[in-house]
Amino acid sequence: MACGQLCRKTPEMFVDRRFRVKRNGNVEIKIAEDERLLLVNLIGQLRELVLSTAPEGEVDPSLRRLYPAAYADNAQQELEYQRSMRDQLLERRLSNLDAVETTLSDRELGQETLNCWIMAINDLRLVLGTHLDVSEEDEPNFLDDDDPQQHQSAIYHYLSHLLGELVEVADN
């Protein structure tokens, strides 16, 4: 019933977390090497995609959630908003990606870097979710092994879980 002390025989996989708040306030990281390699690959892909975004005009459809319309009913105001804000949003996103990439091998994170991780993982998840056409109302579904989007769906669910752990540790 998940109450009381765990038995010594309880497998570590059921209690081991990737992130844990230490007494000094920093967050300890325990990420497997294959997870690090996946994140490096995803960060590189997202960096390339966001760098292809012009300061104005149409955005790659998979980035739609990263650059939502501020003035959907007024094209001129929307254009001005995108001109003034897109570079700032791009700079912040790239900074978050850089912070995660440079700290992937670290053993612990400070609070500021933890926030960068949350933002970058969320951006990765949003872009992949947009590509997979996932909505907030959708129930998690796991695709058949022969479905071409099965691998992307598994990565999406992994990022969702990772983001959940990061948010949970940030709240502590």
Image: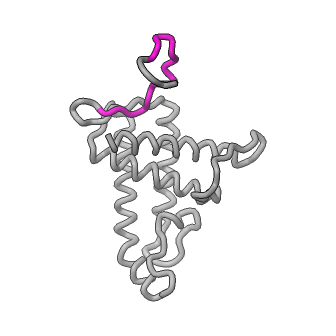
**Front position in the image: 77 or 34:** 77
Q: How is the image coloured?
A: one colour
Q: Determine the residue positioned at 35% across, 62% down.
A: 91
Q: Main secondary structure of the magenta part?
A: loop
Measured as percent of width and height from the top left, residue 33 is found at: 48, 30
Q: Position of residue 116 (x, y in %)?
A: 35, 50
Q: Is residue 127 left or right of residue 112?
A: right
Residue 38, position in %: x, y?
A: 52, 39
At 40% from the left edge and 71% from the top edge, which residue is drawn?
A: 86
Left or right of 68, for residue 98: left
> How many numbered marks, from 0 up?
0
Does residue 75 lie above or below 65 as drawn? below
Residue 8 part of the magenta-drawn span? yes
115 horizontally vs 62: left or right: left
Residue 115 at x, y = what percent? Answer: 33, 49
**Quadrant of the frame with the C terminus:** top left
Q: On screen, 16 above or below 102?
A: above
Is the residue 109 above or below the residue 96 in the image? above
Q: Taking 56 as reference, is 29 left or right?
A: left
Residue located farthest toward the top when viewing the structure as drawn: 8
Given residues 16 and 62, the one toward you in this image is 16
The residue that appears at 43% across and 32% down in the rendered structure is 18
Instruction: Pick whichever, 41 or 124, lies toward us.
Output: 124
* Magenta region includes residue 36: no
Q: Which residues are magenta?
A: 6-21
The residue positioned farthest toward the right in the image shown: 146
